[in-house]
Amino acid sequence: MLRQRILTAIVLLAILLPALFASQVQWFMAVALLAITLACWEWGRLNGYQGKMAVLTAMEGLGFCALMWKMGWPSMHMPMLWLLAGAVWIAIGVWLLARGVSSWQRIPAWCRVSVGLLLLCLAWLAVVQARLVGIHFLLSLLITVWVADIGAYFAGRRFGRRKLAPSISPGKSWEGVYGGALAVLLLSVAWAMGSVGQSDSASLYQHILAGRGWVFVVLAGLLLLAMSVVGDLVESLVKRSVGAKDSSALLPGHGGILDRIDALLPTLPLGMMLYSLA
Amino acid sequence: MKKQSITILGSTGSIGKSTLDVLSRHPQRFEVYALAAHSQVELMAQQVAQFKPQRVVMADASAALRLKSVLKEKGLSALVESGEDAMESIASDAQTDIVMAAIVGAAGLAPSLAAARAGKRLLLANKEALVVGGSLFMSAVKAGAARLLPIDSEHS
């Protein structure tokens, strides 16, 4: 099992890293598009669509992203869109988490699928736009989410007592969230202070420090942390409501694509919102 | 007639400035798709305000950071890209018809090559492109079916 997990990770990195560092941005855009298309397929299946219907969902996601690509949206400055996307994510997160697992199934399937599809496509737009701003900038967003996850894991294991959301994700504790928050705060402050040096772009935190100051660096870190937890919980909630453990078996040993990117789905658009407002 | 869309690599240099001066006299024929410069933030901010390009690239990352702040003060927020790959991207994007390559030195080679491969109408003011990578460059022009117009008198 562990061997399979590691092999899959190696294959994924062998695809992702060259695409990330390729001087032609199109490669990264295409690989991200493939991942989002597969995630759309998983999303359709998690909401009760099977066979052709799930494939159709994936094609809709693919088509929508391709259309945005064709229209040049990735390189457009669009603060209002990101503000709206950020607000939608915060609203969805709060609403779903307040209502719990059972409320999810009461929303009609077509509605769940469409909203999810839209948010997946926005995540594609956000990751691609972040890549256009620069590799260092994109990494500052991705690493924030990973550090939050790692901080939460260790703090949760060591100190975890009070359950965060027992009905949705029994493994998570408030102590884990605090650990994640501490890790993200240290990371964001360090990353705002560091010099831009020879990197290809400034990090998100350097942008926020230059545009808004220290208070906003801290607030941005905390907001990203909170939304990475929300992304995680929303996906868990959806899986739980249909009794699935993984979003699919596309990545042997890891589960599905959505399982890997759940925390990124809200944080990428929010990161672009913070960049646009900074 | 549809406006010709132009990318200027090195817009804050003397050739870049002259090019923009010419463009400003023919607003009905040309529109600026993208501007790229190395580190002159103030001048770039003025050019962005005047020509409203769709994309702005600074080769230097800290200059990109400063430009974003300066543009914000002017009420002109923009997505400011940085780095060499961003230069290549604006030089080869389907949305641009003409590329003015006026970046001095070998730094201008990669984006000029990208424009040649993408089959752009390439106005070449960077002689290093031909000196350093002559045959490589000409084969890229051929492969991309680009049209090469030397701007600097030293070429002809």
Image: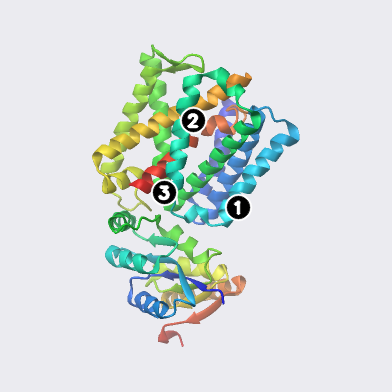
Q: Is residue A104 left or right of residue A81?
A: right
Front tag of 2 and 1: 2
- SS label for mark 3: helix
Residue identified by numbered label 2 = A92
Residue at point 35%, 46% (across, down): A277
Q: Earlier in the sequence, mark 2 or mark 1?
A: 1
Q: Amino acid at mark 2?
A: Ile
Q: Measure how far apart labels 2 and 1 are at the Cα level.
A: 26 Å
- SS label for mark 2: helix
Residue identified by numbered label 3 = A79
Query: Is A187 located above or below residue A96 in the figure?
Result: below
Q: Is residue A119 visible?
A: yes
Front tag of 3 and 1: 3
Residue at point 41%, 83% (across, down): B152
Which quadrant does the N terminus of chain B fall into? bottom right
Instruction: Where is residue A131? Give x, y as percent.
Output: 46, 49
Instruction: Where is residue A6? Give x, y as percent.
Output: 55, 30
Instruction: Where is residue B46? Give x, y as percent.
Output: 31, 67
Residue identified by numbered label 1 = A67
